[in-house]
Amino acid sequence: MMNPKVPVITIDGASGTGKGTVTHLIAKKLGWNLLDSGVLYRVLALAAQNKGVSLEDETALTALANALDVRFIAAEIGESLLVFLEKQEVTDIIRAEKVGNAASKVAVFPAVRTALLDRQRAFRTLPGLVADGRDMGTVIFPDAIVKIFLTASPEERARRRYNQLNAKGIHVNLGALVGELRERDRRDQERTVAPLKPAVDAIIIDTDPLTIEQVVAQVMLEIKKVL
């Protein structure tokens, strides 16, 4: 169950808006706990692929979600959490585009989202939580003290992803990335349960013209208004 005495800040947005990096930096500045909710869906998608479970089989995916053997361990170096699926570290594997697209597909099923809901809310512990996702402010933590919704054009988000992958020596087609992001946006926005949209009381920040540092500064200004 949720503990309303533990403050929560939610940072929602589509893939590539920078919400993951911003969430990590905000959590570090505050000394709070961190929830990257997208990781749970990515791990579930990877588990489904490993076990040969169809991404269209809601019943099998829900059973897999209920029994998901996933652990998060704070990394000694860098800002990321180490992610383990059944004792195997999958931190980098789950960041592949293929897994990200699969995660978007499994996330459309209401029963899957329900199965993962309590796991997400369990991250709400003192001194506070910064939660990153697509429905953190609308569904998972509707009583969050600050709700941020980051936006960016598909073209800018694809450019960022293209540069990230190139830096790792992974060569991809920029036009294909734009197409994949548009398709993921469509699935996320049109799903019947917890569609991607800002909460009515969310602060919307367009990250297209901003650096990560500028986005973090804007978010911290909003947080300081309530803390």
Image (cartoon, rainbow, N blue to C red):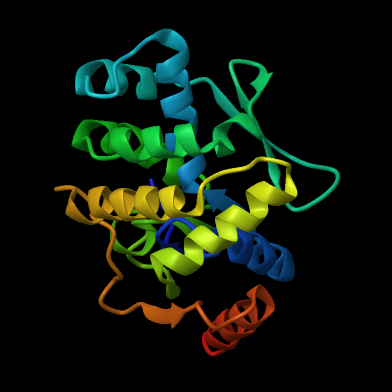
Of residue 59 and residue 189, the one placed in the foreground of this image is 189
Position in image of residue 178 (x %, y %):
41, 56
| Residue 75 in the figure: left or right of residue 16 | right
**In this view, which residue lies farthest toward the right?**
77
Position in image of residue 8 (x %, y %):
49, 65
Q: Residue at x 80, y 51 (%)?
A: 78
Q: Judge whether 73 appears above or below 211 on screen.
A: above
**In this view, which residue lies farthest toward the left?**
192
Q: Residue at x 37, y 56 (%)?
A: 134
Q: Quarter of the image for the C terminus: give it.
A: bottom right
Q: Quadrant of residue 91?
A: top right
Q: Residue at x 64, y 47 (%)?
A: 165
User: Does residue 205 appear in this view?
Assistant: yes
User: Does residue 128 appear in this view?
Assistant: no
Of residue 179 and residue 51, the one placed in the foreground of this image is 179
Q: Quarter of the image for the N terminus: give it.
A: top left
Q: Judge whether 226 appears above or below 94 on screen.
A: below
Q: Quadrant of residue 163?
A: bottom right
Q: Judge whether 223 appears above or below 133 on screen.
A: below
Q: Residue at x 28, y 59 (%)?
A: 196
Q: Quadrant of residue 161?
A: bottom right
**In this view, which residue lies farthest toward the top?**
51
